[in-house]
Image (spheres, rainbow, N blue to C red):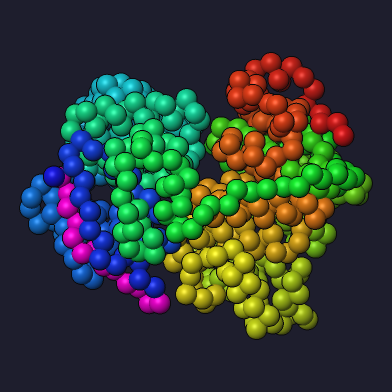
Amino acid sequence: MLLRLEGLSKAYPGVVANEDVSFSIKRGEIHALLGENGAGKSTLVKTIYGLVKPDQGQMALNGQPFAPSEPRAARARGVAMVFQHFSLFDALDVAENIALGMEHPPKRRDLAQQIREVSESYGLPLNPNRLVGDLSAGERQRVEIIRCLLQDPKLLIMDEPTSVLTPQEVDTLFNTLRKLSAEGTAILYISHKLDEIRALCDAATVLRLGKVVGECTPRDTTAREMAELMVGTSLKTPTRPPHREGDVLLDVTNLTAPAATPFGTTLREVSLKVHAGEVLGIGGVAGNGQDELLAVLSGETLLPAGHIRLDGNEIGQLGPNDRRALGVLAAPEERLGHAAAPDMSLTENALLSGRRREELARNGFVNWPRSRDFAQRIIATFDVRVPGPDVAARALSGGNLQKFVVGREILQRPRVLVVNQPTWGVDASAAAAIRQALLDLAQNGAAVIVISQDLDELLEISDRFAALNGGRLTAPRPTHGLTMDQIGLMMGGGSEHKETAHAEA
């Protein structure tokens, strides 16, 4: 046995994150940690990695007491972690980033050689001299993984490792993890993608409301059975009754915008039309212009070239507040810092976005009771697991903050909603609820644009699909009957780019 947890408990004001958690991980085992948002997964792995001190319980690593006071102590005992959000500096190269994560980095030449050897031996080749800002999301994850592997870990913790990867990159990652497992490295794997859990993991421990509620062998358990064990009830599949397509609400023509940062993507002659009652899905590998497209559509970036029309009226030069007043709302991918102010309460974050459409302020004075009621309504409607609306945004788990951010926009009854990665990092039940809310919004006459790297999600809820590649948008095609091969061509800039980029009504 490599790691044993016995009776771990951790409470915060108003919430018990972990309660009497006990389970074990064997050497060389790929062990899944499952649970819906707020189940206590993050607190538990942070305890193992030395970021959180438990109130009760104990751990043993290799048969010896294990109670790391900080991540450095955990790494010294052979525990490494790849976080869901990358901690890399764009302006530094691969070797410099890796050196920053090492206690005693070797000389540059020696480190570069180690990076090449280790990355190639595990099928994750990296050039130590490349700037991180020029890397794809998958290549950035390789940097994080190689940084861990250079520590020769006995236990590797991975939090949502495939959320920004293409299917091909997922296959490469899984081959690497299987090789590590065969060499005796244990892997604690957190993911909401249950089909991946079934394909990869040897065992699974399920948390619900901070407690262990079950264990299973993933390959012998269906994804639905695991999801229902996580939530404690039957899982609802999003449904959508037949609908009639309405008039064009949003009409974008020849949208061209330079990258806002040196490592961004320039948008080139993007054209699309979205009708009332329609969901347009936009797919693509991370870093191909998704953030830039949302910024231009939301008004964060004013349109330098091209046209954006709402009901035939030009809005390309209106800022975010004026577009919101007209009913054009957006939820960006980056939850903490972009979609929500980390140190502000949920009430204050609800006010920032909903001030005009929810009439939360008048004549320069904030109506705090009304703002608090709006935040409370978001929490209740979207099952945000939090003690109350006065909690700071940064205190929420990633999935719960995602539910709050998306719910905040949906409840403002937008005419057009643009959302990037709506279910990133949320559990199966919450993802189904968010997708259903987006479908309901369209059913009520809104035009919805969903930008996502989850192709299954886009195929499930979209009426038409388009792909972003290098800042260009393919011609949208009806989702019904679209094959993965066709989608792969569209995402990779294949034959689809020979078609016109204009989406006709």
Q: Residue furthest left?
A: 64
Q: Identify the residue shown where x is 90% and y is 45%.
A: 247
The vertical placement of 283 against 439, above or below, is above
Where's residue 20, x and y in %? 25, 66
Q: Nearer the viewer, residue 219 or 166?
A: 219
Q: Quadrant of residue 211?
A: bottom left
In the displayed structure image, the side of residue 66 where residue 198 appears, left or right = right
The vertical placement of 4 against 461, above or below, is below
Where's residue 195, x and y in %? 45, 37
Q: Nearer the viewer, residue 70 or 61?
A: 61
Start-end of magenta stretch: 2-14
In the displayed structure image, the side of residue 18 where residue 503 appears, left or right = right
Q: Identify the residue shown where x is 60% and y is 74%.
A: 376
Q: Nearer the viewer, residue 172 or 256?
A: 172
Q: Quadrant of residue 179?
A: top left
Q: Quadrant of the C terminus?
A: top right
In the displayed structure image, the side of residue 256 where residue 343 appears, left or right = left
Residue 3 falls inside the magenta stretch: yes
Residue 173 falls inside the magenta stretch: no
Q: Is residue 316 visible?
A: no
Where's residue 471, x and y in %? 66, 31
